[in-house]
Amino acid sequence: MSTDFKQILKEHAPLLGRVAATYEANFHMRQELLQEITLAVWQALAKFKGDSSIKTYILRVAHNKAITHVAYHAKQPRNDSYCEVETPEPSKAKATDEQLDQQRQIQQMLIHIRNMPIQTRQVVTMSMEGLSYDEIADACGISSSNAGVVLNRARKTLMESIHDAQ
Amino acid sequence: MMPNNQDPLSQLWQQQEVQKPDLNVINKAWRIMQVKQKLYACLDILGLFIPILMLYLNREKLDSFTAGYFVVLTFLLLPFGAYILWLRRCSMGWSSENTERHIHNLKRQIANNIKIAALGKLSIWPIGVLVVLHYVGLFYFDVLPVDRLIRKGLISVCVFAVLFPAMWIWATRRENRFKKELSDLNNLLGIDKEP
């Protein structure tokens, strides 16, 4: 593996983890998806032409891979031996009330995002990753105004769900 | 226009604890994938040349009818093989296209998989007809004595009595699985109609 690619992947590892979390609730499936996404991104990096920022390019490849993953794995019955935990048990002993509250809010946010239609999910998470409307629109294949409408609507319901969790 | 990324929602999103990819596992997976791709390419090439090679190597043993029959068959099956390859052309390794385009390709690939499975199922009948035609030809051109022809024919019937239903069940299951995948994807996208 090229050192540059390894460095880019290391820098964007948390971002890839967040994309995987957007599409998979199950801990083991999420790990599997994360490996699939990383492999796809690594393959795609060799073809990066610099038409967009590297972050936008990585997000686009990662979301596409995640969509392919959910298309092939959605509603498939899982093996009985498969662990159904959503996330490994957090270290509650060390966490303060504030941290626990934040974790609850993040979980609520993820649950809500995973219930969104794919396009909305992509628009809202790309926005939270710092992409502009134009970049989001380009990545999703929609108009900027449409991206704005989808984003504003999604943000509103997301904020409501988080406030409800508090 | 730029969304405000310092808002509480974005901050909360960025603060989530996430798993990180194991780059050593990725490196290993990539190497395995490369070996697999080379193997598949070799198998594709071998698959194309093996029947021709077998015919060439056995040309002394084969009667002229059987040799001619298989040569014609090989050339007739080439377009079928090419069509299957064409249906498989959309590789889903990775894609940097926009999501609309990616989803379109994804749906087309699943639809092609349904076609391939359906073709596999439908190809059972022509195979049966071709086997019968082969025996009729062997009888008509007096290639084999009748008792040997009957014995070989009975063996073929027994083999195909097991093989054909198995192929049918396998192809039907694959076809149903791909149909379900397409339906699930449409449900995820909030679309009821198939492409």
Image (tube, rainbow, N blue to C red):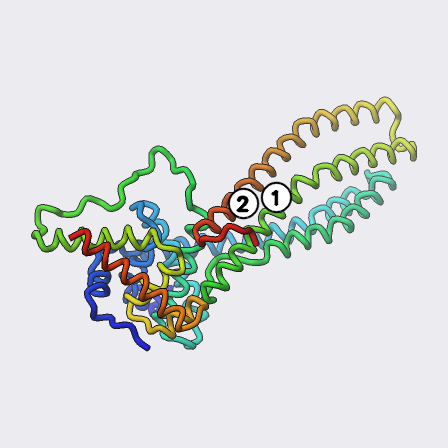
Three-letter amino acid code at the position of disc 2:
Phe
Say whether marks 2 and 1 touch (CB < 8 Å).
yes
Q: Mark 1 Cα within 10 Å, few/some/many (few <14, many 20+)?
A: many
In x, y percent, where is residue B33? 46, 54
Q: Would you say B155 lies left or right of A133 here?
A: right
Three-letter amino acid code at the position of disc 1:
Ala
> Residue A141 falls in which quadrant of the image?
bottom left
* Circle 2 residue: B178
Quarter of the figure with the N terminus of chain A: bottom left
Instruction: Give the structural element (helix, strand or loop) at label 2.
Output: helix
Q: Could you give the CA–CA distance between mark 2 and mark 1, rounded to whole angstroms?
A: 9 Å
Chain under disc 2: B
Residue drawn at (54%, 45%) of the image = B178
In x, y percent, where is residue A164? 19, 52
| Above or below, A118 relative to B71 | below
Chain under disc 1: B
In x, y percent, where is residue B106? 51, 56
Instruction: Give the structural element (helix, strand or loop) at label 1.
Output: helix
| Above or below, A106 relative to A50 | above
Residue drawn at (46%, 66%) of the image = B98
* Circle 1 residue: B117
Q: Would you say B90 lies left or right of A139 here?
A: right
| Earlier sequence position, callout 2 versus callout 1 | 1
Number of callouts in the render? 2
Q: Mark 2 Cα within 10 Å, few/some/many (few <14, many 20+)?
A: many
State whether discs 2 and 1 lie on one chain: yes
In x, y percent, where is residue A126? 33, 65
| Mark carried by residue B2 | none
| Above or below, A43 relative to A115 | below
Q: Would you say B16 lies left or right of B1 here?
A: left
Residue drawn at (36%, 59%) of the image = A38
